[in-house]
């Protein structure tokens, strides 16, 4: 029996004990049985059996005896003493009343015991009896049939029969969305991992996010959509994968869940060699989610890669410059700088400008020693020579609409700043980040100042070097930290 099966069996028995089974039961019987169940989990076998025997000696009521016996079965299952569990189930059937609740609960437990004893056919028969004889107990009947399917699929290694049972559950208990969805989910897993029918698996996963959307929260719906896309990719059904990714992005409200599917579409276009489409989709992602820096950086990186794939190294360099401009934290700046350096290498066929670019961005024109006129000086900021890739009227229209849609608030100015950066209009970007700093609350100042300087001004000046003075100006004004300086306004002319 699988670990999951054992857990299900024990959980079921615990439910049997916890549920009301006999109206005449003493008020303290349930509490006593719960206490014994805790002893079972602590593996206190001797105490468990002694306590159960003592309880049995105090009653003649059949339903009370069944409750006590079910806890004994719980003990046997936890101890993996499956033959004794089966024996106990048979004994309890003989003394159980005609109460349907009692009988159906006991029959489920008998199936669990038989399953543990590897009497698979008998276990399946017991589960099916629950579904057939006690359909009014909908949850219990559906769960029993699900367990029958699990025996076929997991223990007997008969996936086709497991699929048949799961289809039966989905159809028979269609009104019970939770159980029906679980049957579809299990079918999806079998198709994906056992039969490798990825198209069927994708359809099942997709239905979990759509047909059974009310059953799952957004996180799980996102996970099922992701499974559907992955299965379609495994089946080499890339147009279908594109379609499902688009549906997922539209259906998911949170950007954290929607953006991965938007990026998946970019990647799928890359996989199919449709590089222009990949770039168009990347621009769409950026315009749709300008305040999701990680997603936008990933999209822009794919732009760089698309140009490289076409051996358009100058355009790749310009796209890498955009990536570097938009990077706003240490890791993103480091990764983007690497992309720029690689693009210089691709353009030049050597590492000369690549290394000089990295040196200039880190140390400025005076090099690592900070002294002008020495051998490590870097005479030019090569980043400024990287021309942005040519835009198109359609692209310009897309970005213009995205900018116009932003409100004149702190959030809106931030969004406009990022949009202008990716559009290649760095002066406008710096101006919008400047507006964001002016309109933000006190709590938002650190973020606004950081984006103004590390994104807006880095993009506008084309250099990471010497940004410290800008931070000082923002914090202290023209007099600087000492109160005696005369700092030039780095934002003049914006």
Image (cartoon, grey):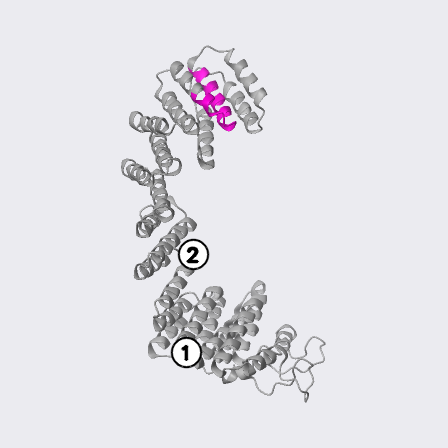
423 vs 140: above or below: below
Q: How many marks?
A: 2
Task: Estimate the x, y position of residue 252 in percent, counting from the top left.
Answer: 38, 55
Whether residue 259 sits left or right of residue 357 in the image: it is: left
Point out residue 383 in the picture as x, y percentages from the top left corner. Answer: 53, 81
Image quarter hosting the N terminus: top left
Task: State which region is magenta.
Answer: 63-86
Expressed as whole percent of the image width and height from the top left, the position of residue 334 reads 56, 70
Which residue is pictured at 36% across the width and 72% down the height? 275
Look at the picture and state if 52 lies above or below 461.
above
Which mark is drawn over residue 257? 2
The circle on residue 245 is none
* Magenta residue check for 367: no
Mark 2: few/some/many CA within 10 Å (<14, 14-19, 20+): some
- Measured along the vertical axis of the image, is residue 335 above or below residue 116? below
Q: Provide residue 14's location: percent of width, then percent of height.
A: 47, 28
Q: Earlier in the sequence, mark 1 or mark 2?
A: 2
Q: Is residue 285 visible in the rendered structure shown here?
A: yes
Residue at point 40%, 18% (across, down): 90
Near-viewer residue (290 or 263): 263
Q: Main secondary structure of the magenta part?
A: helix
Inspect the magenta stretch and tell me whether residue 73 lies in it: yes
Q: Which residue, as the protein is rendered here, is positioned at the far left?
A: 171
Q: Which residue is mark 1?
A: 311
Comparing 419 with 317, the one in front is 317
Left or right: 293, with 270 as reference point: right
Mark 1 lies on a secondary structure that is loop
Camera-side mark, 1 or 2: 1
């Amino acid at each position: 029996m699988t670990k999951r099966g054992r857990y299900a069996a024990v959980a079921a028995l615990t439910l049997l004990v916890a549920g009301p089974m006999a109206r005449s039961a003493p008020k303290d019987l349930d509490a006593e049985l719960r206490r014994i169940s805790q002893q079972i989990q602590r593996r206190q076998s001797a105490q468990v059996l002694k306590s159960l025997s003592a309880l049995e000696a105090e009653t003649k009521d059949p339903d009370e005896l069944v409750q006590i016996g079910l806890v004994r079965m719980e003990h046997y299952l936890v101890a993996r003493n499956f033959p004794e569990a089966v024996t106990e189930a048979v004994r309890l059937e003989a003394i159980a009343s005609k109460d349907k609740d009692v009988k159906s609960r006991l029959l489920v437990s008998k199936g669990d015991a038989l399953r543990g004893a590897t009497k698979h056919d008998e276990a399946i028969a017991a589960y099916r009896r629950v579904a057939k004889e006690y359909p009014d107990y909908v949850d219990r009947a559906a769960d029993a049939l699900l367990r029958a399917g699990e025996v076929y699929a997991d223990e007997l290694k008969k996936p086709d029969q497991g699929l048949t049972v799961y289809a039966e559950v989905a159809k028979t208990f269609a009104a019970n969305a939770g159980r029906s969805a679980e049957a579809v989910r299990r079918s999806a897993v079998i198709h994906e991992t056992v039969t490798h029918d990825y198209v069927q698996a994708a359809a099942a996963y997709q239905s979990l996010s759509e047909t059974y959307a009310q059953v799952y929260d957004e996180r799980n719906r996102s996970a099922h959509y992701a499974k559907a896309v992955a299965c379609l990719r495994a089946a080499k059904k890339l147009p279908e994968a594109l379609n499902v990714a688009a549906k997922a992005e539209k259906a998911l409200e949170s950007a954290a869940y929607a953006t991965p599917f938007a990026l998946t579409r970019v990647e799928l276009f890359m996989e199919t060699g449709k590089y222009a489409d990949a770039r168009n989709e990347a621009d769409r992602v950026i315009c749709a989610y300008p305040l999701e820096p990680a997603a936008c950086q990933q999209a822009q990186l794919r732009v760089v890669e698309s140009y490289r794939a076409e051996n358009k190294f100058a355009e790749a360099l310009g796209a890498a410059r955009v990536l570097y401009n938009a990077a706003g934290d240490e890791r993103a700046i480091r990764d983007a700088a690497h992309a720029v350096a690689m693009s210089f290498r691709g353009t030049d066929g050597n590492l000369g400008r690549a290394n000089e670019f990295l040196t200039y961005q880190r140390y400025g024109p005076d090099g690592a020693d900070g002294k002008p006129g020495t051998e490590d000086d870097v005479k030019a900021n090569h980043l400024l020579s990287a021309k942005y890739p040519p835009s198109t009227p359609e692209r310009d229209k897309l970005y213009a609409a995205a900018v116009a849609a932003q409100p004149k608030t702190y959030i809106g100015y931030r969004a406009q700043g990022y949009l202008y950066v990716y559009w290649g209009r760095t002066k406008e970007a710096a101006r919008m980040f400047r507006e964001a700093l002016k309109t933000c609350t006190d709590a938002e100042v650190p973020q606004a100042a950081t984006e103004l300087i590390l994104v807006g001004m880095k993009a506008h000046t084309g250099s990471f070097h010497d940004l410290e003075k800008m931070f000082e100006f923002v914090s202290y004004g023209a007099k600087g930290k000492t109160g005696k300086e005369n700092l030039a306004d780095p934002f003049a002319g914006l």
